[in-house]
Image: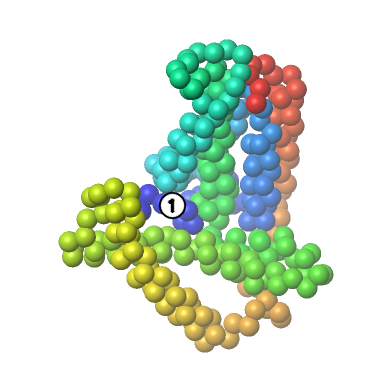
Amino acid sequence: MKNISLGQYYPARSPIHQLDARMKVILAILYIVCTFLCKNVLCFAAIALSSILLILISRIPLRTVFRAIRPIIFIMIFTATINLFFTKGETLLFSWWKLQIYMEGIYSAVFMVVRIIVLILGTSIFLTYTTTPIALTDALESLLSPLRVIRLPVHEFAMMMTIALRFIPTLTEETSKIMNAQKARGVDFSEGGLIRRAKSLIPILIPLFVSSFRRADELATAMECRCYRGGKGRTKMTVPHLHVRDFAALVLMIAFGAGIVMLNRYGFGYTV
């Protein structure tokens, strides 16, 4: 549970930290699009190198960054296995009973794992690691402000998303405390089969739900005591402004996306 880093902000002085939060949301979306545009070996190599470059520029320790990948290792293994055994091709490498492994299946499995890792690293660096929850709330509200024309509660929507993201580490810590308390009472979460382990989680889920509802009630009370009434008529102490560095980062991301498109067209190797 301590390895889950989603929703945690890492304070540092880096060019990415200094970017406007609205621009970082746009850059994260464009980076996701670039990731899904990758089709061949050169594109995946370029997107992998770009993620390493983002880590170096953000000045976040590698241990902290790659901690976000640990919770999804099972998903990566499962996805790679599915692509490995169910992708057909022309070059057969191994065959036993109904299991067949093609060279194309290996390429597809590797590419899928790289894509998942890059997606997690890119979004974490642009958003959660380098952007505070308050700045992220203001950015989402600003970007979604045109939807007010159709009377959508943009401020409330952005506030709910940010509160949910903010309380992920809190709930993770609460789960760890409950598990330690249950272990102190003699509960063993590693014994038995899958069904028995699932049943042993019930003493964790019930207190966790109770604690979550209690925290939600306390948060609502605190917001009401501070006269919070939504986004209508609210002002901001700090008004964000876009600078030259923000537009320069946008131009670099667009140029990177154009390079990915060119590599897709003129690259070589296996194509997914």
Residue at the spot x=54%, y=18% of the render? Answer: 102
**Could you say whether the residue bearing mark 1 is in a helix, strand or loop?**
loop
Left-right relation of 215 to 17: left
Residue at the spot x=55%, y=56% of the render? Answer: 131
Number of on-image labels: 1
Query: Viewer-proximal residue, 33 or 191?
Result: 191
Q: Position of residue 216 (x, y in %)?
A: 47, 75
Name the residue carrying label 1: 5
Q: How is the image coloured?
A: rainbow
The answer to whether 67 is drawn above or below residue 197 in the figure is above
Q: Position of residue 90 (x, y in %)?
A: 61, 14
The answer to whether 229 is drawn above or below residue 122 in the figure is below
Asked if residue 167 can be seen in this view, the reply is yes
Q: Residue furthest front?
A: 97
Query: Label 1: few (<14), some or many (≥20) within 10 Å?
Result: many
Kind of residue at badge 1: Ser
Query: Viewer-proximal residue, 190 or 138?
Result: 190
Q: Position of residue 207 (x, y in %)?
A: 34, 70
Q: Position of residue 244 (x, y in %)?
A: 71, 48
Residue at the spot x=41%, y=64% of the render? Answer: 170
Q: Could you say which quadrant of the image residue 118 lies in? A: top right
Asked if residue 248 can be seen in this view, the reply is no
The answer to whether 181 is drawn above or below residue 74 in the figure is below
Q: Quadrant of the C terminus?
A: top right
Q: Residue furthest right?
A: 149
